[in-house]
Image: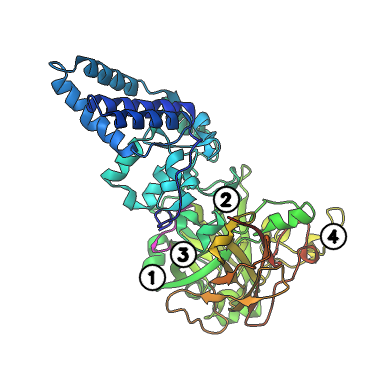
Amino acid sequence: MLLLRRCRGLTPCGGLAPQRGQEWRRALRLASSSSSSSSSSSSSSSSSRDEQRSQHGGHTPGWKQAFAGLLAGTGAVLAYGLHHHQAQHTDAVSVHAHLSRLPVFSQEEVTKHRTLQDGVWVTYKGGVYDITDFVAMHPGGDKILLAAGGALEPFWALYAVHDQDHVLDILSEYKVGELSAEDQKKQESLRSGDPYSSDPQRHPALRVNSQKPFNAEPPPEILSDSYITPSAFFFKRNHLPVPRVDPASYELLVEGGPGGGLRLSLEDLKSRFPRHAITATLQCAGNRRSEMNQVKHVKGLNWGIAAIGTATWAGARLRDVLQAAGYGPDAARWARHVQFEGLDKDAAGTTYGASIPLNKALSEDGDVLLAYEMNGEPLPADHGFPVRVLVPGTVGARNVKWLAKITVSAEESASHWQQNDYKGFSPATDWDSVDFKSAPAIQELPVQSAVTTPANGAVVSRAEEQLTVKGYAWSGGGREVVRVDVSLDGGHTWQVARLKAGEEFSPPPGRAWAWKLWEVTAALPPESRQLEIVCKAVDDSYNVQPDSVAPVWNLRGVLSNAWHRVRVQIQDD
């Protein structure tokens, strides 16, 4: 599991805890010493060494015993100290008073402690905890840092193994204060009157590109942890506030048709049409835009490599719904497009819209869904609850969420996002010369791959002797990735990665809607001090990624699919 993998070879980090954490730990030792009466000289010596270590911010080897002393020792003093150890009783009461007067911290102050250098603080149920010393001992390794400066609850909600008494006991040892009541209520008060006030809560591990509208991607290493991307970690791409939709009153309008149109409730979609499920990858047109920004500035959100994810989607086939509305094969005589309109709208009432070719919508092999489930659950709000369009093999921008209306037409959608965005241009085109009408709207996406681990700038030990590189690869239009080549020396020599697909993965030709995760383990070059890891994917049409960004650069930063490059340092032990 993400936060609870076995991590060996780590040692506790010292010299990192803030002063307030030191005071709390000294209180633990005071309680422990109160419970042990007159100890031997060796114990006194050990206590002295512990005190010195605490002054430098590190946990003592006996931190568990200290905590046990607080629990057991304090009770013993209260029961027995009235007769024989009045001084110890006084000390224990002082400790209790100290703990009941823990300082109150603001969320702003907690947020400052997000690194080992500044200390790692988290909050849990109103408490503030300095877990700096525990990071190195965490069974899941340094992924615990995803929660640094924020709340533990969103992570523990996903990983129920934390919900055990002994885990809470360990956490309690690191408590240094309380979160202010004002900060516990602040978020709700700030949301009132805001057009984004109904937006759902999001997982704090997401890397936010914009708050309003909300756009975020997960840490890249999460993508290669599981073939199916958990909904909480699936990238979020919103153009407008997330609408609140009552599923009981929801209605989808299919305009026109021989019968004059069709209106469907959510229950109609579920009961009148067969449920169809597919596993498909969605990718934002701007995935990896940040690499284009390194060549020359572009306009758009600065996406990294994780604006992509794979889920199992379920719903009614769009083909079935269109046929129920009277649109059969004859519709192709006069129509060319199927337009979609969402319920999300701006202050002027303009809604998000897009369209796809009619032949994709009506094709039995197109697998276009009116999806109401994601990974076996109702669609999350950020992903289009209660119904969205799922157009496998096609750019994310055409997969309209919170679907309100479907129109079969001879024309493309007139939406801004169809006509004046999500189009590719020559590197020579600038904002003074661009003509959006001269370029087609992006539909199918080109072949893509990226390295998810190790991260760019990572340091690996030469003692490891080998390095495992992981990543993803995908191609649009149902084209299957057949090979991923990986290089550790910038592209001079190559190895073929092992491809990993989902269970029972054997897609029919032209319907490979989901990515391949890949992995390669290679020996560290004996003389190298830096590796330049490169990956490139090849699909079943033998499309391959270009070797550099500059030739595919464009002013909107879309379609970024050059070889992905990651630089890693090798450290001699």
Which image quadrant is residue 152 in? top left
Q: Magenta segment range?
A: 374-381
Report the mark closest to the observer, 1 or 4. 4
Q: Which one is earlier in the sequence, the residue at label 2 or at label 3? A: 2
Report the mark closest to the observer, 2 or 3. 3
Evaluate whether residue 180 shows in this view.
Answer: no
Q: Which amino acid type corresponds to the residue marked 3 in the rendered image?
A: Ser
Where residue 452 sits: x, y (%)? 57, 61
Q: Which amino acid type corresponds to the residue marked 1 in the rendered image?
A: Arg
**Residue holding disc 3:** 226
Where residue 6 sits: x, y (%)? 40, 57
Mark 3 vs 4: CB contact within 8 A: no
Using the numbered discs, state the Cα–Cα distance from disc 1 to disc 4 in whole angstroms. 49 Å
Mark sitting on residue 216: 2
Vertical order, 337 against 189 (above or below): below
Q: Which one is earlier in the sequence, the residue at label 1 or at label 4? A: 1
Neighbor class of circle 2 (other Cα within 10 Å; few <14, some 14-19, many 20+) is many
Q: Secondary structure at mark 4?
A: loop
Camera-side residue of 346 and 234: 234
Mark 4 vs 2: CB contact within 8 A: no
Q: Which one is earlier in the sequence, the residue at label 4 or at label 2? A: 2
Using the numbered discs, state the Cα–Cα distance from disc 3 to disc 4 in whole angstroms. 39 Å
Q: Which amino acid type corresponds to the residue marked 2 in the rendered image?
A: Ala
Q: Which residue: 49% across, 41% down?
A: 148
Where residue 336 sits: x, y (%)? 66, 74
Q: Which one is earlier in the sequence, the residue at label 3 or at label 1? A: 3
Mark sitting on residue 272: 1
Using the numbered discs, state the Cα–Cα distance from disc 3 to disc 1 in whole angstroms. 34 Å
Q: Which residue: 58% across, 55% down?
A: 573
Using the numbered discs, state the Cα–Cα distance from disc 4 to disc 2 in whole angstroms. 28 Å
